[in-house]
Each structure stands twice: as structure tokens, then as C-alpha cells.
Image: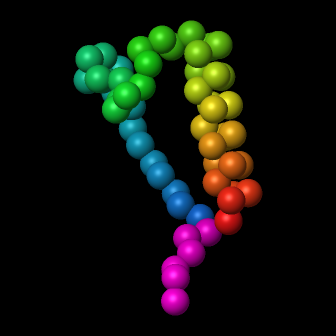
Amino acid sequence: MPVEIRELVIRMTVDDAAGKGNTGAGESQDNTPEAIIKTCVEKVMEILKDQRER
């Protein structure tokens, strides 16, 4: 019987001094508001697509 996770809580602490060299795996270093919004929209669209495929 498959297990379905209905809620996942992720917490993190950001330290500006420690994270200047690493922006994440495959993430763009462009931190303009437009780039952030574009990334968020792309991720939301991926989530919606995955939900429709189920």
C-alpha cells in the first residue's frame, strides 16, 4: 500500500555571510525580482502539471 505525504514542513535559516558563494544546485545567480517570480511560476506550473498527471 503506497504512503502519501499530505504535508511537508521545511524550515531553514539563511546566513548571508556563509551563502554568498553557493546559490543552490542548478539555480541561477540572478536575484532580480523578475527572475525570482519567473522561477516561482515555473515551479508552480510543474507542481500543477504533476497533480494533473495523477
* Residue drawn at point x = 59 percent, y = 26 percent: 39
Foreground residue among 32 and 3 = 3
Work out whether 23 lies above or below 6. Answer: above
Along the line of sight, the residue nearer the viewer: 50 or 17: 50
Where is residue 27? Give x, y as percent.
42, 25
- Which residue is most to the bottom? 1
- Determine the image quadrant of residue 33: top right
Q: Residue 34 placed where, x, y %?
A: 65, 13
Compared across the picture, whether 1 is left or right of 26 comes to right
| Residue 34 magenta | no
Q: Is residue 16 toward the left or the right of residue 36 in the image?
A: left
Q: Which residues are magenta?
A: 1-6
Looking at the picture, the colour scheme in use is: rainbow
For the point 60% across and 38% down, the residue is 43
**Residue 17 visible in the current orientation:** no
Which quadrant of the structure image shows residue 45?
top right
Q: How many marks?
A: 0
Say which quadrant the C terminus sits in.
bottom right
Whether residue 30 appears in this view of the structure is: yes
Which SS type dominates the magenta stretch?
loop
The relative height of residue 45 versus residue 27 in the rendered view (above or below) is below
Tell me where residue 37 appears, x and y as whole percent.
65, 22
Residue shown at 48% from the left, 11% from the top: 30
Say whether residue 2 is magenta. Answer: yes
Which residue is pictured at 55% across the width and 70% down the height? 5
